[in-house]
């Protein structure tokens, strides 16, 4: 169920290459975090790729997600380079304070 939600989130067209890469990496982490501990990683990665494959041409973030799935199942194993979006301040307590 979460896989379908992740795929739906990544099907956003018209993203810049940088934003597509960020969203693809975040989607991979979201999918990875949702896997049960007893799951077979290669089988789950293949299932996720199969579910996402029909939409690859429509969404660049989904292509990044699928690329990570493929790269993570290759042998010999090696660490993936995951890139998260830069931290941004959104106001927080300072933004809520009013100057009098």
Image (cartoon, rainbow, N blue to C red):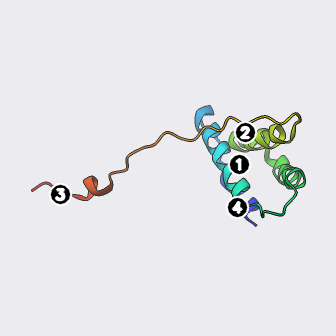
Q: Judge from the rendering whether residue 68 lies leftward or rightward of residue 87; answer left or right.
A: right
Label 4 CA crowd tier, 10 Å (few <14, some 14–19, many 20+): few
Within 10 Å of disc 2 (Cα), the crowding (few <14, some 14-19, many 20+) is many
Of 38 and 82, nearer the camera is 38
Task: Please give the label number shown on residue 64.
Answer: 2
Residue at the (72%, 39%) spot, across then down: 64
SS assignment at label 3: loop
Label 2, secondary structure: give it. Answer: helix
> x%, y% of residue 18?
59, 33
Residue located farthest toward the left when viewing the structure as drawn: 100
Residue 5's tag is 4
Q: In this picture, is 52 found above or below 64? A: below
Give the Cα separation between the discs numbered 1 and 3: 39 Å
Q: Is residue 41 above or below residue 77?
A: below
Mark 1 vs mark 2: in front = 1
Q: Position of residue 90 (x, y in %)?
A: 37, 50
- In this view, the residue in front, 30 or 75, is 75
- Classify residue 33 as left or right of residue 41: left
- Label 2 to label 3: alpha-carbon separation: 42 Å
- The residue shown at (64%, 37%) is 21
Q: What separation in Å lies between label 3 and label 4 (alpha carbons)?
A: 38 Å
Describe the element under mark 1 as helix, strand or loop. helix
Upstream in sequence: badge 4 or badge 1: 4
- Looking at the rendering, in which quadrant would you find the N terminus? bottom right
Quadrant of the frame with the C terminus: bottom left
Task: Tell me: residue 51, above or below residue 60.
Answer: below
**Residue 60 quadrant:** top right
| First reached walking from the N terminus: tag 2 or tag 4 | 4
The secondary element bearing badge 4 is classed as helix
Asked whether the beta carbons under mark 1 and mark 2 sit within 8 Å of each other, the answer is yes
- Of mark 1 and mark 3, the one earlier in the sequence is 1
Return the residue at label 3: 98
């Amino acid at each position: 169920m979460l896989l379908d939600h992740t795929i739906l989130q990544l099907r956003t067209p018209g993203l810049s290459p940088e934003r597509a890469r960020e969203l693809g990496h975040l989607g991979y982490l979201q999918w990875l975090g949702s896997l049960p501990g007893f799951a077979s990683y290669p089988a789950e990665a293949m299932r996720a790729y199969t579910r996402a494959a029909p939409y690859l041409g429509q969404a660049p973030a989904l292509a990044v997600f699928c690329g990570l799935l493929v790269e993570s199942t290759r042998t010999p194993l090696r660490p993936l380079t995951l890139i998260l979006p830069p931290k941004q301040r959104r106001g927080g307590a300072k933004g809520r304070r009013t100057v009098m």
